[in-house]
Image (cartoon, helix red, strand yellow):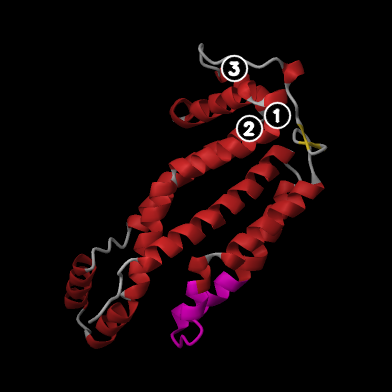
Amino acid sequence: MNTLWILLLKQPLSNALLVLVHILPWGSIGLAVIILTCLVKIILLPLSYQSMKTQLAQKRIQPIIDSIKKTVTDKQEQAKQLMAVYKQYGVKPFSSMLVLLIQLPIIIALYGVFLNGIDATIPLAYPFVAVPDAGALSVLFFGINLAGKSVILAVLAAIAQFLQIHFSPMMRMNREASKDASDTTTMMMNSMQRSMKYVLPVMIGFFAAVVPGAVALYWIVSSAVTLLQEVVLFRKLSRQNLEITH
């Protein structure tokens, strides 16, 4: 399993990082981290689009779902009607989870590449990938050593994560939808979201402070690109005719 993980994910990403370091000016690892993170995000964009589309559709048909759950007591009939609603509006309730499961291994592999550093990628180099000369590599990024720990990048990673959650259109929509919620489940979810908004950035900030600066830079770029993608996708999907009537 470990060999398959390396062959299908870590090795291609590691060598992509090598290629970028080789062709970029001054062998800048910082620029290579930024570009590779953006490229992976672009490759995963169709999956992100599908996930957000499903979430928005589910939100819009939520009143219909709630109505069925309140009025239909028979569980079998309730499930039948819910599936009919999902089919009618083209909603696949588990597709967003599937999209997340597909993205997760790639994101973890990308994180592992940056965590291990450029030296760990050299034994994995393909024959056609030139291994950059260690003396030509630049681990400095705006004066920060990406091979070592960086409190500055750790703080920026925490701030970037907070801003991503705070300005996320989906998170904002969830907060607005749950303001007047009275059921216990929705209230608990709203409370968890509020807590995560502050807890997650602190956790990432602490962790980013004890790993190489390249990992912290990856988190910063990933948070920024993720927020940008969410804003663009949300606006695009919101302009589509997704009005739901029952």
Q: Earlier in the sequence, mark 1 or mark 3?
A: 1
Does the image show residue 70? yes
Q: Nearer the viewer, residue 233 or 175?
A: 233
Mark closer to the observer (2, 3): 2
Crowding at dot 3, Cα within 10 Å, few <14 / some 14-19 / many 20+, comes out as few
Task: Please name the residue shown 74% across and 18% down the image.
Answer: 136
Drawn side of residue 81 relative to residue 187, left or right: left
Mark carried by residue 123: 3
- Rendered position, 96 above or below 123: below
Asked if the residue under mark 3 is in contact with the one under mark 1, i.e. CB atoms within 8 Å, the reply is no
Measured Cα–Cα span from mark 1 to mark 2: 6 Å
For the residues labelled 2 and 3, say whether their Cβ atoms are less than 8 Å apart.
no
Q: Are marks 1 and 2 in contact (CB under 8 Å)?
A: yes
* Residue annotated with mark 2: 32
Of mark 2 and mark 3, the one earlier in the sequence is 2
* 115 to 50, vertically: above or below: above
Q: Which residues are magenta?
A: 173-194
- At 64% from the left and 43% from the top, the residue drawn is 218
Q: Main secondary structure of the magenta part?
A: helix
